[in-house]
Image: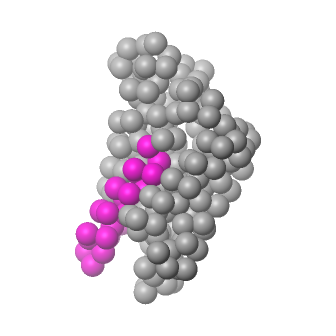
Amino acid sequence: MTTRDIVYIALFAALTAALGLFPAFTLPVIGVPITAQTMGCMLAGAIAGAKRGALALLLFVVLVAIGLPLLAGGRGGLGIFMGPSGGFILSWPLAALAIGALYQRNLLRLNAVKEALFMVAGGIVLIYGCGIPWVSLVAGVSLKQAALGSLGFIPGDLVKVALAVVIARAVRRAYPTLG
């Protein structure tokens, strides 16, 4: 691991923490807050790459687990992972890994549509694929109920995808040798 790797890992863990400063809104149906922090996964994978992005989000998750109040609303600690948000948060390193891998495999053929699809695949589909079963288990509701309760997140997540694509494209344009 190089100094550059460590810097990227720390930077994107810090960025994800900073995104927690935006106020959260909790949907009453399933008790999971809508935050800007999932955009940290998208940006980490798209800009830092699969390995560094995943390690950045893993670092973030570990810091939350040991009690640092880095989640939206100043939340942190192991108890967070036992609640309805746990599956979503634990999936963040996997989301960054998936997005980064998709970017790295298609680096020379990227366009805004592909980037948006990569962000949706990793930043929405994968995260929901982990989070919804977790909500079902923790809340004692059916998968269908948990999935229906999660529908309220889709519009906000699509806005985050659009923002992440614009930001990632701007960063890659400004720093073409990034990597």
Q: Is residue 110 magenta?
A: yes
Q: Which residues are magenta?
A: 91-116
Where does residue 21 sit, x and y in percent of width and height? 72, 50
Residue 95 showing in the rendered view: yes
Where does residue 8 sit, x and y in percent of width and height? 54, 71
Residue 40 showing in the rendered view: no
Image quarter of residue 49: bottom left
Report the front residue among 67 and 131.
67
Q: Is residue 12 magenta?
A: no
Report the front residue among 126 and 54.
54
Residue that appears at 40% across and 50% down: 94
Q: Does 76 appear above or below 165?
A: above
Classify the position of the C terminus by image quarter.
bottom left
Residue that appears at 25% across and 74% down: 109
Where does residue 4 sit, x and y in percent of width and height? 53, 79
Image quarter of residue 147: top left
Residue that appears at 56% across and 47% down: 61
Residue that appears at 49% across and 30% down: 152
Please identify the dominant SS of the magenta region.
helix
* Callout count: 0
Where does residue 79 sit, x and y in percent of width and height? 63, 29
Residue 134 falls left or right of residue 4: left
Residue 128 falls left or right of residue 35: left
Q: Does 168 appear above or below 140?
A: below
Report the front residue among 116 and 127.
127
In the picture as drawn, the residue positioned furthest to the bottom comes out as 177
